[in-house]
Every structure is written in C-alpha cells, then in structure tokens.
Amino acid sequence: MTAAGDDAARAALAAFERHHVSSLEALGDGCGDLAVRIRAWMVEHDVVFGDHPIPFAMAPHCLDVPTVQRVRDVVEVLTRVLDRFCTAYRSDPGLHRALDLPPAEADLLAIEPTLDDPLQLCRLDAFLLPDGAVKFLEFNAESPAGIGYTDVLYDGLHEHFPSLHDPATGLQLQYERITPHLIGVVRDVEQRWRDWTTRPDGPGRAIGIPASVNRPSCLLVDTADSPSVPEFRIICAELERAGFDARSATLDELARVDGRLCVDGVAADVVYRRALVEDVLDPYASPGAAALIASVREGTVAMFNPFPARVANNKKLLALIGAPGFAHLLLDDEERRVVAECIPWTRVLATGGSSLPDGSAGDLPAFVEAERERLVLKPASDYGGHNVYLGAHTDPETWSALVQAHAGTSDWIVQEYLDVPTGHFPAIEDGRFIMRERHFNINPFAIGGRYAGMITRTSTEPVINVSAGGGLLPCVAVELA
C-alpha cells in the first residue's frame, strides 16, 4: 500500500474509534446496566478463566488494514522457520546441544512423528511498537489459549454495541475467526492420520482402526486443575457442530484399551493436546500420561501439537534463530530479514563471552549485571508470565542474584528490554464510561502454517498475561465498507 493509502487507512481507523466512543458517551447513566448485562452474558457463554469472567474493554482492539497485513506476512514467514527448527531438532546435533533439554524431555521429542508437521498450532506473542515495528518476544506452541474465548467475545461485543456495525459510518470491522482454522487442522490431521494408519503396512490394520468413520472422535486433553475448562467447552461445541464427537478429558482419564487411547472405553482418533510436556512427564502423573505417550509412539492416535513443537516453545530458540550456527535453517533473504527485524536481541544466559547488542564481543554476565535497566530475564521453559524480571522494575540486588544463580545453568535467557506499548481502551467502571490506559500486546495465531487471526491482551502491569489477571480482546481490522 502507498503512503497515501496508509494515511487513509489510519484516518478511517481514527474515525471509527471516535464514532464508537461517542456512542458510549451518549449512554450516560445506562452504562452501569450495560456492564451488568455484558458480565452476565460472558458467564453464560463461558468467557470465564478459572472462577472469573475475563476482563475486557468495551470494544475490540482496532488496527488499520496495512498493520494487520504486515502482521499476517511476518507471522507466516516466522512460522515456516519455527516449523523447520522443530523438525531439525531430531537430526541436528548442534541444535540438540544448544537447547540442552532435560533427558526425559529430549526422549519425548525424539518420538518419530506420525505426520511430518510438528507445528500445527502456534500463538506468536508480540509488541506492536509506535513506529509500526512488530517484535516477537516468545512463541506459545504448546498450549496457546484464547481461540474459543476470543471468537465468542467478539460475538458478544457485536451483539451489545450496534455502533460497531453501524452502516452510517461507511466503515466495517474485519475479524478473522480463529476457531474455523482450528477445526480445519483437526479435520486435516485426522484424515491424514487415518490414511497413514490404514495402509497395508500401517499400524491400524492390526488393531482395527477403520479406514473412515462418520464422526471421528477428538479429545481435548489437559490436566485436572486447568483453569481453561470453560474455553474447552466452547471449542468442543464447535467441533461437535463440525461433525466430530468431541469432549475434553484430563490426563487422569486416559487409558489404553486394545492398543487404542480411550476415555470411558471410547477410542480417540485425534488428541488436541493442551497438557504441557512437563505435565505429561510429571513423575506423579497418572498412568493416563503413559497411555498418551505410548499411543503417540505407536501412531495409534493423531496428536497436535506433537511433542517436537516444544522446540518452538523454548525461549532459547529466540537466541538461536538468528545465530550464525543455525544460518542453514533460514532458507532465503525474506526469512533472514524477518528474523533480523522482528526478533529482539536475545541470548542464553551463560558464562563467557557473547556478541552484545552493539555487535561487540563481551562478557555476557558482566554486561547483564551492568545494563540491568536495558534488559529482561526469563526462564527458558516457564509460561504464564511467571518469573519474568524486567530490569527497569527489579532492584539491583535481586537482579544480581538472578544473574549469578542462573548464568552457569543455561536455563534462562536475557533479552533486550522494549517499552511495553500502552493504549487507551473504552471501559465502564462504577457505572460510568471512561477511557482506561492499559499495557497491551498482540497475539497472532498460526494454524496449519497460515495466519489465523489475532487477539490482544491487556494489563495494568507491564508483564501481560490472562492467567495473572490480564484482559483479552478480539483484534480487528477497520476498512471501508
């Protein structure tokens, strides 16, 4: 798009936002009743995390069309690269050494995949900076949440706010629903798995896997204490409407019967894995985890994401993806450009020298201690915003202790600190309309290797995560009707 086109797109976005804010201001005292109705609607429709409705604003997060297109383009390039790293882990000794995974985890990732597509589903968490740059801070390739919640939340906003689809504006929202992409992957994985298992040399003949069924069985599997069960109900209902027998199950409920993975004696064809690798490997886990591993190993169930997707989930990959030692895994100039532009400076926190942000060589732990306010420390394998230390918000003594404790383990990363973007989002508090400033990030999904829509998360704190009390919004493009 030309510069004039970009300006027009931004002007359309600003006009749309003004129209919606004006409509909220015009509600006056009716804001309080509206907030009560929306909260009840969310509970009724399972937009609940744990025991509480998910915090959200009174509008989707609106972006201009060129920005959404730019995100779409870089997501699809990065997903190709991430998938290649996941595949390479099993055969590339250098990558195996650099990730240095615990032996039990490495053994799990070494299982021969039934289908050669380790990264079917990924949420790429990013900052959208004021200059338009997109910077990806981590990749959630194991258990990315938000797909079902956000589609339903968009429907709720559309229902309660006519100003969002007022034809008089000459503008419209373009929201890419995420759940249909997910269902497409489930359908594709199930069909390719069934074709593979029922070949003359496949495992299905011996244990009686039929060549086709009217309603394949899909299990969404997580731990018994997952706070995301309401979202599981949303997704399973969509799968049922799409022709699957779908239910969520816990690891405790899984069992092997005549070579098949079953719940209550009913065999599963597809497992949508929401349980993390550490949950599956938990030495105190039930025999159901062992049943899942055995079924995946023997190819008697299709599973996405398969275990090798864990490679993309490990934050060390942010340090390796652009490193000279792995240049052979970037195949063209476009991939090299996207990695260079969209991944912030990241290093595995280890003793010894390293290339620093300015390109010079230096002692990494000494640099990290000295430049605290410019950096972020994170464990390589944690999730949910746990144990993320922003140097600018961490006292020097705590920071120094972290560096000294973890520099010799190679299980943490250090990353360039980026100012967390902030925006003003419409909200209703104490029965009154206000514009509320919040930190936010964008979270595009890649499903089946393609861009599949985007959500936005918001927080009063600079570390943003729904599990830590952050909010969730559908992310939409505004364009001419």
Image (cartoon, rainbow, N blue to C red):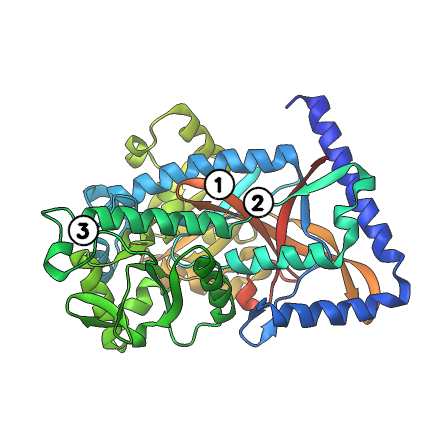
Above or below — where is 473 with respect to 428?
above
**Which one is earlier in the sequence, the residue at label 3 or at label 2?**
2
Above or below — where is 7 with respect to 398?
above
Q: Residue at x 48, y 39 (%)?
A: 75
- Residue carrying label 1: 451
How many labels sit on residues?
3
Q: Residue at x 83, y 40 (%)?
A: 168
Q: Residue at x 72, y 54 (%)?
A: 59
Spot occupied by residue 474 in the image (x, y as percentages of width and height): 62, 52
Secondary structure under the numbered disc 2 in the rendered image: loop
Q: Left or right: 273 with respect to 258?
A: right
- Residue carrying label 3: 197
- Residue 176 shows which numbered tag? 2
Neighbor class of circle 1 (other Cα within 10 Å; few <14, some 14-19, many 20+) is many
Neighbor class of circle 3 (other Cα within 10 Å; few <14, some 14-19, many 20+) is many
Q: Callout 3, which amino acid?
A: Thr
Q: Nearer the viewer, residue 217 or 46?
A: 217
Q: Residue at x 23, y 67 (%)?
A: 261
Q: Callout 2, which amino acid?
A: Glu
Q: Callout 1, which amino acid?
A: Tyr
Instruction: Measure how far apart labels 3 and 1 are at the Cα level.
Output: 29 Å
Secondary structure under the numbered disc 1 in the rendered image: strand
Q: Nearer the viewer, residue 285 or 234?
A: 234
